[in-house]
């Protein structure tokens, strides 16, 4: 490999949420953190170089949107996903969770409903609840270690919902939804006058052998009834740059949202967010990403094999996208609190409790394997010993 992902970087005392928030969340600092979805490797070097180059110029005054920002996104989406979009369909968003909040605040009123499939990324239900919007959650079907959609329930839940919030690819399960599944979702939601919000932040982390399909690309029905959020933040390990954007092909929806965003100046981007997108979406950035994905795939293969061989009672859900593995720990015979105690007190690991992802997450833990192999080996060794001692 041209790039080195094995270097262990000490992230303590850098105001890292993943490392420096352990005391506040777990009441201790001796845990190996494998929770927050950022990577422990160095961020994409072409992005770092671009920011350094700009900082050589000594004035950081107010900046305009760079001319190349929209064309860089257009080229990336076309090259990676064969998705053709128009420049006017794009808008800067200061983070996808904020973007979803802006959509809900603008288009919903208290008492309206939003639907979603769970378990799912927790802000999907935390954000609407904060604005007194009712959340309708239905657990996905777990079939042979892989999540599937119950379309009859989806039809029922979206009949009186204003929005359906989709995780595409799915977090925490790592499912890459097929074009057929997405088309069926689009047809159901369009029939029920329910707009689809598609969070596609993990799209660029689609693993070798799988193909991400943008929701809006599967049909005219999906295109005209969707709002898609994307960002290079996860794949290029630059989440603190809040370099997100939204694609809204429907002119009526877009113009209404633009008026709201422009009125509050919410869609004015940041200098380094713009530059990060332009740098990440270059051939150099793509080369780095492809190697990063190979490394992540190897880590996933190693973790899945190690757990199957050495850690009875835990079944890993093999992701098709992302560096997150959802661990089915129900075979340990413990309740959710007991599972957490085993991971924290015995294995000294900080993972995301499956319950935090809503209904269907009970008995699961989410593990982040975007780390050097040595870190992953240590974590799995700790977990294997903890489970072995528990089973004695």
Image (spheres, rainbow, N blue to C red):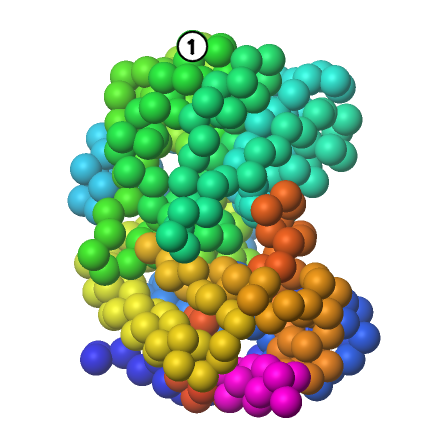
Residue 175 visible in this rendered orientation of the protein: yes
Residue 259: percent from left, percent from top = 56, 18
Q: Taking 158 as reference, is 203 above or below it?
A: below
Indicate the position of residue 194 as horizontal and vertical percent values: 50, 16
Q: Is residue 278 left or right of residue 23?
A: left
Residue depicted at 24% across the width and 64% down the height: 290
* 213 vs 171: above or below: above
Q: Position of residue 345 (x, y in %)?
A: 73, 81
- Local crowd at mark 1 within 10 Å, few (<14), some, or many (≥20)? few
Q: Which stretch is magenta?
A: 379-392
In this orientation, which residue lies closer to the viewer: 376 or 270?
376
Quadrant in which residue 107 is drawn: top right
Image point 56% across, 39% down: which residue? 139
Q: Secondary structure at mark 1?
A: helix
388 within the magenta span: yes
Residue at (49, 25) in percent of width and height: 154
Q: Residue at x 38, y 52 (%)?
A: 144
Left or right, residue 109 beside residue 118? right
What residue sits right under mark 1 in the picture? Answer: 191
Task: Determine whether 303 is above or below 80 in the image.
Answer: below
Quadrant housing the N terminus? bottom left
41, 283: nearer the viewer: 41
Q: Based on the picture, tell me whether residue 305 belongs to the magenta stretch.
A: no
Indicate the position of residue 40 as horizontal and vertical percent values. 48, 75
Q: Can you tell which quarter of the image residue 125 is in?
A: top right
Position of 241 relative to 4 (above/below): above
């Amino acid at each position: 490999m041209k790039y080195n992902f094995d270097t262990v970087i000490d992230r303590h005392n850098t105001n890292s949420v993943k490392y420096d928030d352990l005391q506040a969340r777990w009441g201790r600092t001796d845990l190996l953190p494998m929770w927050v979805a950022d990577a422990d490797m160095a961020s994409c070097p072409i992005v770092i170089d671009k920011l350094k180059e700009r900082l050589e110029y000594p004035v950081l005054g107010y900046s305009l949107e760079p001319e190349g920002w929209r064309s860089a996104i257009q080229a990336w989406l076309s090259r990676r996903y064969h998705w053709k979009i128009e420049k006017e369909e794009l808008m800067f968003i200061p983070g996808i969770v904020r973007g979803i909040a802006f959509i809900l605040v603008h288009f919903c009123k208290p008492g309206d409903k939003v639907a979603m499939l769970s378990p799912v990324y927790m802000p999907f239900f935390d954000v609407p609840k904060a604005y007194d919007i009712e959340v309708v959650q239905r657990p996905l079907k777990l079939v042979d270690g892989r999540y599937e959609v119950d379309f009859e329930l989806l039809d029922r839940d979206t009949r009186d919902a204003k929005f359906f919030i989709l995780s595409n690819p799915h977090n925490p399960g790592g499912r890459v939804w097929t074009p057929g599944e997405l088309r069926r979702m689009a047809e159901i939601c369009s029939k029920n006058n329910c707009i689809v919000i598609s969070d596609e932040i993990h799209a660029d982390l689609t693993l070798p052998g799988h193909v991400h399909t943008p929701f809006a690309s599967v049909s005219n029905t999906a295109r005209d009834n969707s709002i898609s959020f994307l960002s290079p933040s996860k794949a290029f390990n630059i989440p603190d740059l809040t370099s997100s954007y939204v694609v809204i092909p429907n002119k009526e929806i877009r113009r209404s949202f633009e008026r709201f965003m422009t009125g509050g100046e919410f869609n004015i981007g940041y200098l380094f967010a713009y530059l990060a997108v332009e740098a990440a979406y270059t051939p150099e950035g793509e080369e780095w990403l492809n190697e990063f994905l190979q490394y992540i795939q190897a880590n996933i293969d190693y973790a899945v094999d190690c757990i199957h061989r050495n850690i009875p009672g835990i079944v890993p859900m093999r992701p098709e996208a992302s560096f997150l593995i959802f661990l089915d720990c129900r075979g340990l015979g413990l309740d959710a609190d007991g599972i957490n105690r085993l991971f924290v007190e015995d294995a000294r690991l900080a993972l995301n409790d499956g319950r935090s992802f809503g209904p269907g997450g009970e008995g699961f833990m989410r593990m982040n394997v975007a780390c050097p192999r040595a870190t992953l080996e240590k974590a799995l060794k700790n977990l294997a010993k903890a489970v072995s001692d528990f089973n004695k």
